[in-house]
Image (cartoon, helix red, strand yellow):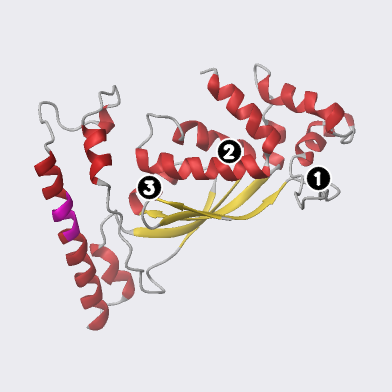
Amino acid sequence: MRMKVLDHGYVEFVEAWGHGKELTVHDTGFIDNEIGIIESARQSTQGNFRGWGKDQTLLEYLYLSKPKHAGPFEFAGMTIEVQAPIFVFREWHRHRTQSYNEMSARYAPLPDNYYEPNFDNVMERAHTITKNKQAQGIDGIFLTEENSKTWLELLDTVYNRAELFYDFGLKIGIPKELARIGMPVGHYSRMRATGNLRNWLAFLTLRMDPAAQWEIQQFANAVGSIIHQKFPRTWKLFRLETSKK
């Protein structure tokens, strides 16, 4: 399950867990990775999973109660692989509740992939009125179509020169760990990220929000699609909660 994001990025499902003591596989091949949440919640009373006919109410209570009983949602989770621009990873890695392992340019040459923003998207973002100062240009400066096209052309030039610099360093024997230092944050990198379900939902709460940078929103939406498929009951409760905010 790999979903394309931006021009060269993707989010790919690797594995999920949370099936509890016994692996439950439905006729469709769906593995129920939310039973472990219920088993964890009942650990204090030494109870067991009783079937979703009875335990759906418990799941809803755990997630929707105020304050939320979020601990049991740490007993389910997933691992994904992500290819994204480095500046997206800079934001993503602020979620320190996940574990990461990123590709290293110390061991292998980097692929020639750079993020190029879409012209229409750049113009739309520049002219959208928002209270989010991070999403605005400098006060008093109006972005014209001509200047936007010039900027995108210059970006291509920057990327090309960075790639030439990198390739030249490798060809003349510069160590890979040094040859990479000229790479811009628009260069793509790749990582695996793993976390429990509670913390994935915390990630989505922040990164699917309209105030988040547009690029990481696209990756968060892809992550949400995977959670929807792998943890459908919890996803429904998450969407119900976020729709009320």
Question: Given the image, on which type of amino acid does mark 2 rest?
Answer: Asn
Give the class, few, some or many, for how many residues have Cα within 10 Å of label 3's Cα (few <14, many ≥20).
many
Q: Which mark is residue 89?
A: none
The residues colored magenta run 152-156
| Image point (36%, 73%), residue name | 109
Give the class, few, some or many, for how many residues have Cα within 10 Å of label 1's Cα (few <14, many ≥20).
many
Q: Is residue 97 visible?
A: no
Q: Which mark is residue 88?
A: 3
| Image point (57%, 35%), residue name | 201
Structural distance between the alpha carbons of marks 1 and 3:
34 Å
* SS at mark 1 in the image: loop
The residue to which callout 1 is attached is: 20
Quarter-wise, where is residue 9 in the image?
bottom left
Left or right side of 122 for 41: right
| Image point (67%, 50%), residue name | 16
* SS at mark 2 in the image: helix
* SS at mark 3 in the image: helix
Question: Given the image, on which type of amino acid does mark 3 rest?
Answer: Val
Q: Which mark is residue 199?
A: 2
Q: Earlier in the sequence, mark 2 or mark 3?
A: 3
Question: Given the image, on which type of amino acid does mark 1 rest?
Answer: Gly
- In this view, 33 is above or below 161: above
Counting from the top left corner in percent of width and height, residue 44 is at 84, 30
Q: Are marks 2 and 3 in contact (CB under 8 Å)?
A: no
